[in-house]
Amino acid sequence: MTEMPTHALFDEWDERYNSFLDQLPELRPNPVVITEIAGRPTGSALDIGCGMGADAVWLAGQGWDVTALDVSQVALDRAAAAADQAGVTVTWIRSRLEDLDVPEGGFDLVTAHYPALLHSPGRDAERALLAAVAPGGLLLVVHHADIDVELAKSHGFDPAVYLLHDDVVALLGADWDVTVDRGRLRDVPAGPDGQHTHDDVVLARRTR
């Protein structure tokens, strides 16, 4: 597999966001974040592929010290404006997860909703995802369930090149306390065609 240069990846996602910014509904935090994280003790959090920041802003409002990254500056600019409007502070970083300089000890919470983490010969995304979670920390990863591959390809995504639900579950060995919820019903369907009605959820605590 030939890996896309970082600058080309940044440009591609900026183009994507510019193409549909005016079509997006009001941004709200993902329901799984609220369900799984509300009321938990706070700490440091990393939001991977934060998009326009709804989850990061919500987490910051709950008292988390949030770092949020995305490869699109267009998305991050919108996210920063949303944080300002909400009166919360988030550290916004334009980066791939694989290139992020993770602080020593990692994050108490790492969350990724519908992440575009690419397979690579060196398994860079997999290693970076696990390394980001502190001992005792939580990993929350959510994917769309029952993906229509041909429909996804028509929107410019080939699921085969990305880490999907089963790939993430397979990473979590004896050092993880893992809860898997396949096919969780969404209150509101997602996707441009409303095709995403269920989510696959992985919540795992790193035990050491």
Image: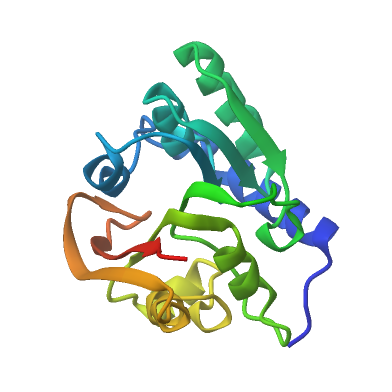
- Residue 132: x and y in percent read 59, 57
The residue depicted at 50 percent of the width and 58 percent of the height is 135
Q: Is residue 50 visible?
A: no
The residue depicted at 47 percent of the width and 36 percent of the height is 43
Q: Is residue 93 visible?
A: yes
Instruction: Tell me how many marks there are.
Output: 0
Q: Quadrant of the N terminus?
A: bottom right
| Quarter assignment of residue 34 | top left
- Residue 55: x and y in percent read 42, 38
Q: Horizontally, is 77 left or right of 86 in the view?
A: right
User: Observer-nearest residue: 76 or 91?
Assistant: 91
- Residue 109: x and y in percent read 46, 48
Q: Is residue 45 above or below residue 58?
A: below
Q: Horizontally, is 28 left or right of 109 in the view?
A: left
The residue depicted at 56 percent of the width and 20 percent of the height is 89
Question: Which residue reaches farthest front?
Answer: 208
- Residue 94: x and y in percent read 72, 44
User: Observer-nearest residue: 195 or 105?
Assistant: 105
The residue depicted at 70 percent of the width and 40 percent of the height is 93
Q: Horizontally, is 3 left or right of 66 in the view?
A: right
Q: Horizontally, is 60 left or right of 49 in the view?
A: left
| Quarter assignment of residue 169 | bottom left
Q: How is the image coloured?
A: rainbow
| Quarter assignment of residue 120 | bottom right
